[in-house]
Amino acid sequence: MASPAAGVVVIVGSGLIGRSWAMLFASGGFRVKLYDIEQQQVTNALENIRKEMTFLEQSGSLKGSLGAQDQLSLISGCLNIQEAVEGALHIQECVPENLELKKKIFAQLDQIIDDQVVLSSSTSCLLPSQLFAGLAHVQQCLVAHPVNPPYYVPLVELVPHPETAPATVDRTHALMRKIGQSPVRVLKEMDGFVLNRLQYAVISEAWRLVEEGIVSPSDLDLVMSDGLGMRYAFIGPLETMHLNAEGVLSYCDRYSEGMKRVLKTFGPIPEFSGATVEKVNQAMCLKVPADPEHLAARRRWRDECLQRLAKLKRQMPSQ
Ligand code: NAI
């Protein structure tokens, strides 16, 4: 576990993702300063984190080796950015997904940070070359994109700006490992990074299959949750190829013609509009009505499933 004396982590923006990061860094023993422009947001965040950590401790799912009380004592709210960043080793930006707002915040931070701290953005889809263009400390900047909910889904995509120093990526990679996350290096920036490109490929074909009347929306989802998704929680598509034949070479030998034949039948990019939206929406609302209460209840259920899956993954011996 990291010693609090090893440094301070600053979270800029105490919304949904900022709170999760705060909990993760505290679980690794880091001191966390949670900065926001809204006092109420910070107050709500600290209260929400306290409840969440107490619940996690009671259900045996609290991360890290410290108890909830000790982890909570590592997190403090802050409304002064200059004070917050003093002596920090890592700054994780978590403000709303708006390029101009993020650029403004990075320009402000660029003026007040030292040459050591890593400046990291949680952005889901803005490119590092847009976010960090022209910053004096660009070598210290990168994107560290988490997956919602980050406390249970450990993947973090690390995406450098073309001028990011390799040491910045290495340090962030090590830091993410220290707090129990699973970082991957995206070697060059690319729209959608990796996770969303895969996700959009799946959504795209799912949409076309429903649009063409090949399968119902609810059965389509079942193909993933009771089929592909079961194995993808443990092995990726490339290892799946390796295991589903006598290695990748044999898989390509056996199945490449079939894959190419099927892939040629994939249609154009869907419009995500018209009758298919109605059809998908109706099916989803039948299962989970789209009002705040039902959606929140279903998200809680999803998070509990993910929490148990995360536990199972930790318990499985790795080969
Ligand atoms: P949110 O809306 O829940 O929280 C944003 C917070 O930033 C609020 O507390 C707000 O008061 C604060 N804020 C606004 N302007 C500020 C400023 N100038 N200085 C400091 N704080 C400021 O947003 P959320 O969902 O937490 O998203 C944050 C980032 O994380 C976005 O870039 C988003 O794309 C990314 N992300 C979100 C995921 C999600 O599922 N919500 C998943 C992965 C990444």
Image: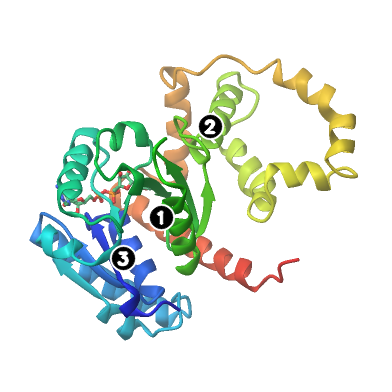
Q: Position of residue 110 (x, y in %)?
A: 20, 47
**What's the residue type where badge 2 is placed?**
Ile
Rounded to the nearest angstrom, the CA distance separating label 1 from label 2 is: 19 Å
Q: Is residue 292 above or below residue 74?
A: above
**Mark 3 residue type:** Ala
Give the label, 3 or 2, closer to the camera: 3
Residue 117: image quadrant is: bottom left
Indicate the secondary structure of the residue bearing disc 3.
Answer: helix
Q: Residue at x 52, y 61 (%)?
A: 306
> Is residue 141 shown to the viewer in this render?
no
Q: Is residue 273 positioned above or below 280 on the image?
A: above
Estimate how packed mark 3 is, as few (under 14), some (14 to 19) or many (20 or more) residues with alpha carbons within 10 Å: many
Front label number (1 vs 2): 2
In the picture, measured across the screen, residue 16 lies left or right of residue 265, that is left
Q: Is residue 100 above or below residue 297?
A: above
- Which residue is drawn at the image coordinates 39% and 74% (left, top)? 27
Please state the horizontal and vertical placement of residue 146, each as a whole percent of the image: 42, 51
User: Foreground residue, 76 or 40?
Assistant: 76
Determine whether the residue tagged by mark 1 lies in a helix, strand or loop: helix
Disc 1, disc 2: CB below 8 Å?
Answer: no
Q: Which residue is mark 1?
A: 299
Determine whether the residue tagged by mark 2 lies in a helix, strand or loop: helix
Residue at the spot of label 3: 22
Report which residue position mark 2 lands on.
203
